[in-house]
Image (cartoon, rainbow, N blue to C red):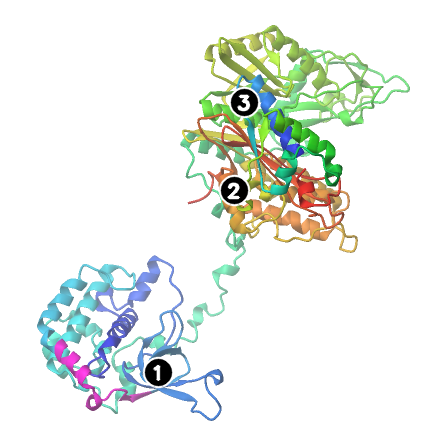
Amino acid sequence: MIGSSVPTFLWGDALSTVVYVINRTPSSTLFFQRPFDVLANHCMLPPLVKLMPRIFGCVTYVHLSHRHRTKLESRALKCVFVGYGSTQKGYKCYHPDTRRFYTSMDVIFDESKFYYSPTDLTPTCLEDVHHLANHEEVLCFDIKLATLPTSKPSDEDTSTMETPTVIDSCSLDTSTAIDPCSQDSNDHCEKSHQPLDSTLPPSAPVNSSPESLPIPTLQVQPNNSSEICLPSDIAHHALPPRSTRGIPPVKYEPDPKAKVKYPISNYISSHKLSASYASYVCKLSSISIPSTLQEALADSHWTTAMTEEMKALKKNATWDLVTLPTGRKTVGCRWVFAVKHNVDGTIERYKARLVAKGYTQSYGVDYQETFAPVAKLNTVRVLLSLAANKDWPLLQFDVKNAFLHGDLKEDVYMDPPPGISEYEGSTQVCKLRKALYGLKQSPRAWFGRFTQVMKKFGYTQSNSDHTLFIKHKMGKLTALIIYVDDMVVTGDDAEEIHCLQHHLASEFEMKNLGDLKYFLKIEVARSKHGIFISQRKYTLDLLSETGMLGCKPVDNPMEQNHKLFQCSSAGCTDKGRYQRLVGKLIYLSHTRPDIAYAVSVVSQFMHNPRQPHMDAVERILRYLKSSPGKGLLFSKHGHLGVDGYTDADWAGSANDRRSTSSYFTYVGGNLVTWRSKKQSVVSRSSAEAEY
Amino acid sequence: MAIGVCELLWLKNLMKDLGFSQRTAMNLYCDNKSAIEIAHNPVQHDRTKHVEVDRHFIKEKLEAGIIQFPFVKSEFQLADVLTKAVSNKVFTSCLHKLSMNDIHAPP
């Protein structure tokens, strides 16, 4: 640096140039490998930019693009070479007159000249140099000490870096001491990292460098690069070795995992979950359930489950085999498969169930009245909020074969079950005596029975939600909510809960599933922060079913200022698929108010979906991909107040200019209900729309 | 607003069944001042004839002290995310206030 008489404020550039060259020069301590290659064995590096090494401080001519000059001006600027671009591929040059740095590849070097000749050094520059020279002895060892423990600017292994750095900085400084203004020592930056040098003790270069190294004269300068043993591949790195030339890079290998640009694992993980919950979640995801009979018959787990179910049905005398009376139709039936989990996530059993195809029944002939005890999820969320605020336990009960408890009053004829060898080829049909899953009337029979039992225990049925049963006893409360045959029990009366469980077990065949974890495909997690519900598995199943697991995620579920309206000009899309998808999304919005609006918009086009609507649905799926595990957190706020937020937009629908009204309600500081609904009338003002 | 009031009344009944009666009026935040004023206005105007039934329903509950309508600025209006597609910034801040988060999110 001193040799090229560069002003001292370029010291930083000189240092980074030195580091640049060292990293690309073979070193004896690394068995004549380049530090960069050594580092590349340990981690991924950006591809090396191949630049011819040049002499620091020499004259360069930087080509100016035509935007930066008029046609009458010179096409190049005379600059000084100060290093290599750190962010760009190119040589870094400094133009002292305009005080600008240029990083460019279009540079012509004149390495025989230095930009700053020693004669035109300004007095300040000289002062700086002397100042440096005065402190040389101190500096030499200071730098040595300073560089030993700390690594160099680039983040290489310190062990590989220390030796060359120390020697380099010493030799640089000591040489300045000898001959501060000499042109001969101009190239110490490059010379000092010769393998020879690094073996020398730090004091050696003081004496040896002027004699032992070939003093680069002006004429031999261009050959300098070959003299300092730079690896030849820096200069000629156009082609890889012949042996690997024809082999395509790894990225084209047919490994589907490597191909996915946005793997789902980037968006979901279990690192925040407790160990037992994480294993439960993992188990949930690991088993697939057959959807057709053929799939199930291939697996021994499912065939044994089917024979067990048949045994139970026969034991229960569920049906008689008769010939079909004339004028009557049969109801079809099929198998449904499920996996039952224990509380700790292990598989309890494989379950097969014969269900009647209730949808083939006709009203007035096969059944009269129907009702299903389906809990409102709003009520479930209110109970969760209460449980979070009051630290109540949440328990889950299950009734085995709930529907089989009811007797059938009507005459129902059913096809013999498929896949069972003894019925194949038979012309007889089954006349049902007991209710079977899938029949229209069975839930009503079951719920009537259940209500009777609960009332006998002293529980009252809530008017707000008929599936909620409450008992107040001495200021304590027990609440039970039933969703067909799944029950959630909560309350502050542990004794009464135990009692209730005992009572129910005496009436029905009951199972205690322990703490609430998985209810209606909603995963429930509990920690000291509160209760968290999400539909993670449901979302993941939905994504994998639609083949969107590898899609690119987006940050919000709907485009801003979307113009979705009922258009008949756009291309058609698969109506069935659209309706199935939107149906699933509607169920998903039970734990996700964030997609509620988007789902309400896309569900307005259910009857005639077109391509833009399908795109909107796909965008929702892409949003789900970005956070499949998102859900609601019920935490403790110490009060049970009810609050609400209401809002309406005005004339938001592009088709009929109707407005959308919406609300959120909070119980005890936790979000429990929300709704986004298009109004049934056209409103004339935004104030009117609020009503 | 009417459906919001309905929902609050349902919640009130449910909480009463569970033994937690609401003694104070429930807040239903609204960001439209004229709508709030119309609810408080004792006179039935001709201009509001299209929403007459809803207005009377809301007014009845308001006078009974069951609900009240505090004003909330539009930027703090959470229900915005349910009426229009909002920008990323508003969306994320709203989700935070809805206490929606992701325990499965990677680090």
Name the residue furthest front: B43
Magenta part of the chain: A110-132
User: Who's the residue at 48% across and 63% down the image?
Assistant: A249
Report whether mark 3 lies on the same chain as mark 2: yes
Near-viewer residue (A269 or B96): B96
Counting from the top left corner in percent of width and height, residue A642 is at 54, 28
Q: Position of residue A525 (x, y in %)?
A: 48, 30
Q: Secondary structure at mark 3?
A: loop
Chain identity of mark 2 = B
Would you call the spot at circle 1 few (<14 residues within 10 Å), some (14-19), or many (20 or more)? few
Residue at screen point 32% across, 79% down: A53
In this view, A106 is above or below A259:
below
User: Is residue A109 placed above or below A293 in the rendered structure?
Assistant: below
Helix, strand or loop at mark 2: helix
Asked whether B40 or A685 is in front, the reply is B40
The residue that disc 3 covers is B22
Tell me how far mark 1 sits from mark 2, CA to CA.
52 Å
Amino acid on which the number 1 mark rests in the picture:
Thr
Q: Are marks 1 and 2 in contact (CB under 8 Å)?
A: no
Does residue A443 lie above or below A536 as drawn?
above
Q: Which mark is residue B5?
A: none
User: Which amino acid is tagged 3?
Assistant: Gln
Left or right: residue A351 versus residue A31 is right
Q: Chain of mark 1?
A: A
Report the residue marked by disc 1.
A98
Mark carried by residue B95: 2
Q: What is the x, y in percent for residue A259?
A: 53, 55
Dot 3: few (<14), some (14–19), or many (≥20) neighbours within 10 Å? some
| Residue count near mark 2 (Cα–Cα under 10 Å), binned few <14, some 14–19, many ≥20 | some
What is the C-alpha distance between the residues marked 1 and 3? Answer: 75 Å
